[in-house]
Image (spheres, helix red, strand yellow):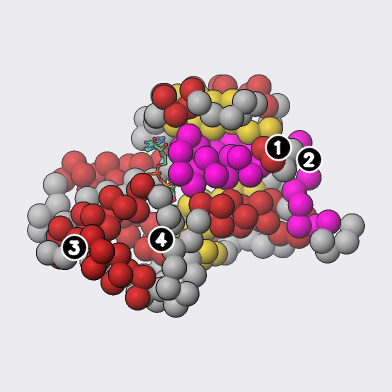
Amino acid sequence: MTVVESLTPRHGLRVLITAGANGIGLAIAKAFQEAGARVHVCDIDTQALASLPEGISHTVADVSKEEDVDRLFQDVVSLGGLDVVVNNAGIAGPTAGIDEIDNDAWTRTIDINLNGQYRVAHRATPLLKESQGLLINLASVAGRLGFAYRTPYAASKWAVVGLTKSLAIELGPEGVRVNAILPGIVRGPRIEKVIEDRAVKRGLSYAEMEQENLSKISMRRMVEPSDIASMALFLSAPGGSNVSGQALSVCANVESL
Ligand code: NAD
């Protein structure tokens, strides 16, 4: 196999992606399908699930619910195993000072962003041990930088990096790799809402807030969902087979938040 050949994942990989009906998860799902993988996704957005590209199977499942994750893994049996699991589900959580945050909003952020990844990793690990597979956890640049007024989000994403590094050590001897991808500001509706909320909080216009965000990125630009999908494919390809335990930023170098 040449180096260039080693950059393409093996045909027929069995891939599970949580929250795969929109945004980054959907971009990853489409990329794996294009690479010849058998892809299963879960999501809570039934409408978006119904319009997934043909060939991508799905389960309506909320990663914050034990019974939904159980049902997801019952459905996944039809793939006959799992080679790659992408823990992608995550919410932005509230934008508020620590003394103003609503308790339920804090708990919900941790329950989806961190506990959701645990629930999926807990069930996926026996399958990944069997295939000597790969777990990819979506963190964020907010998992390597402090993020004022977004403490539940940042705390959950730093925790995802801790989960990733610990699991890589725990599962490496059994041939399972675990990595985190840390996206920067990814173009799309989610980030528009984040900028909007932060602008209100700071008393700025949307354009001023966006400009301030871009000024903290070395490349002065957002990244695309496809940039995150490219990293997921690289990690899944033979060329990525010695990358484990890493927190990989794909962010055009976000310097601060
Ligand atoms: P998004 O807000 O576009 O949502 C993606 C999907 O998540 C939606 O289809 C939604 O229905 C689903 N979802 C929400 N809650 C769910 C739950 N409890 N169970 C199952 N599905 C659920 O998200 P995105 O921007 O594509 O982000 C994907 C991941 O990347 C998240 O973990 C996010 O924290 C991370 N991330 C995103 C950005 C960004 O700029 N968009 C930056 C850094 C990290």
Callouts 1 and 4 close, C-beta under 8 Å = no
Residue that carries the numbered disc 2 in the rendered image: 11
Front label number (4 vs 2): 4
Residue that carries the numbered disc 1 in the rendered image: 37
* Residue 178 appears left or right of 202: right
Front label number (1 vs 4): 4
Callouts 2 and 3 close, C-beta under 8 Å = no
Q: Amino acid at mark 2?
A: His
Q: Earlier in the sequence, mark 2 or mark 1?
A: 2
How far apart marks 1 and 4 lie (CA) works out to 27 Å
Callouts 4 and 2 close, C-beta under 8 Å = no
Quadrant showing the N terminus: bottom right
Please say if 60 is above or below 159: above
Q: Amino acid at mark 1?
A: Ala
* Residue 62 appears left or right of 164: left
Residue 74 appears in the picture as rendered: yes
How far apart marks 4 and 2 lie (CA) works out to 31 Å
Of residues 189 and 56, the one drawn nearer to the viewer in this rendering: 189
Quadrant showing the C terminus: bottom left
How far apart marks 2 and 1 lie (CA) works out to 6 Å
Instruction: Report crowding for label 1: few under 14, some 14 to 19, many 20 or more residues within 10 A (C-alpha).
Output: many
Please say if 86 is above or below 248: above
Callouts 3 and 1 close, C-beta under 8 Å = no
Q: Secondary structure at mark 2?
A: loop
| Residue at image location 45% in from the left, 24% down from the top | 60
Disc ID at residue 205? 3
Residue that carries the numbered disc 4 in the rendered image: 185
Q: Amino acid at mark 3?
A: Ser
| Residue at image location 42% in from the left, 73% down from the top | 220
The picture quadrant for ligand 1 comes to top left
Residue 178 appears in the picture as rendered: no
